[in-house]
């Protein structure tokens, strides 16, 4: 019995998602220059020809990966700040999620650490202005902080500047925690041990980020 249109679309979506996950793993491991379609296919568990069926070359595949990751990031940020809670509470939970992603979604975190090196290899300046993934994330945060200022929960200042400061503090803390995680891993600790050893520093980093928001 032939498959329905809906079944074919579902299969296509599953295959493309597998390819995206394979491309993500290869990119984090090797970067764009050293990445190979063969490696992506192996990580995805599909034939190399299937990758070429969807993507004409490596560049088109990794352009799609970057756009996919930016969309996921923006979707997560919009959803997070649409939840109930004060601006300070939402920002605190956002920072905690980002820090814990170092363990729970490490490939995603490593993508964003690495991707800045390859943006201009894959996109023109005009295309990059159109993507605006970071600006989109910051705008969601700006809106939340502005509401917090109106409610008296957040210090009075430029919400745009405060969002930049909060974001920058969070990124610096993530870089520090990533280096600590890497060093502890090299010392022979397993992931659960590392999470336990970094618990206090994650809490301290979160509080440090949030402290700049309070009146």
Image: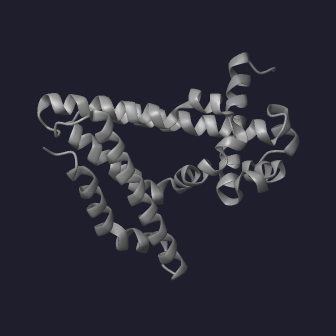
Q: Residue at x 57, y 30 (%)?
A: 129
Please identify the quarter of the rendering in which residue 157 is found. top left
Q: Residue furthest bottom?
A: 187
User: Percent from the top left, x then y, of residue 90?
Assistant: 27, 40
Residue sitting at 48 percent across and 38 percent down? 134
Return the residue nearer the eye: 117 or 7. 117
Q: Nearer the viewer, residue 170 or 127?
A: 127
Count every numbered label the image shows and give the total. Answer: 0
Q: How is the image coloured?
A: one colour
Residue 92 appears at what percent x and percent y?
27, 48
Quadrant housing the C terminus: top left
Picture coordinates of residue 110, whole percent (x, y): 56, 55
Relative horizontal placement of residue 194, taking residue 66 as reference (left or right): left
Left or right, 171 with respect to 4, comes to left
Do we see residue 19 in this rendering?
no
> Vertical placement of 34 versus 147: above or below?
below
Q: Residue furthest top?
A: 5
Q: Nearer the viewer, residue 172 or 45?
A: 172
In the image, is 213 to the left or to the right of 28? left
Q: What residue is shown at x 71% (from left), y 30% (from top)?
A: 11
The image shows residue 200, relative to residue 137, as above or below, that is: below
Q: Is residue 17 above or below residue 106?
A: above
Name which residue lies at 17% across and 39% down: 154
Q: Quadrant of the N terminus?
A: top right
Q: Is residue 66 visible?
A: yes
């Amino acid at each position: 019995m032939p498959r329905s249109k809906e079944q074919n679309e579902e299969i296509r979506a599953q295959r493309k998602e597998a390819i995206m996950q394979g491309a993500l793993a290869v990119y984090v491991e090797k970067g764009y220059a050293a990445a190979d379609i063969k490696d992506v296919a192996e990580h995805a568990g599909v034939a190399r020809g299937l990758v070429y069926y969807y993507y004409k070359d490596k560049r088109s595949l990794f352009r799609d990966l970057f756009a996919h990751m930016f969309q996921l990031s923006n979707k997560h940020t919009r959803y997070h700040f649409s939840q109930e809670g004060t601006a300070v509470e939402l920002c605190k939970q956002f920072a905690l999620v980002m820090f814990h992603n170092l363990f729970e979604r490490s490939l995603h975190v490593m993508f964003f650490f690495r991707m800045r090196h390859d943006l201009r290899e894959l996109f023109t300046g005009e295309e990059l202005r159109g993507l605006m993934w970071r600006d989109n994330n910051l705008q969601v945060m700006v809106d939340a902080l502005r509401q917090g200022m109106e409610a008296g929960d957040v210090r009075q200042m430029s919400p745009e500047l405060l969002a930049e400061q909060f974001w920058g503090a969070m990124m610096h803390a993530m870089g520090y925690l990533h280096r600590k995680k890497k060093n502890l891993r090299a010392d022979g600790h397993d992931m659960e041990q590392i999470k336990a050893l970094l618990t206090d520093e994650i809490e301290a980093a979160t509080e440090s980020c949030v402290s700049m928001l309070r009146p």
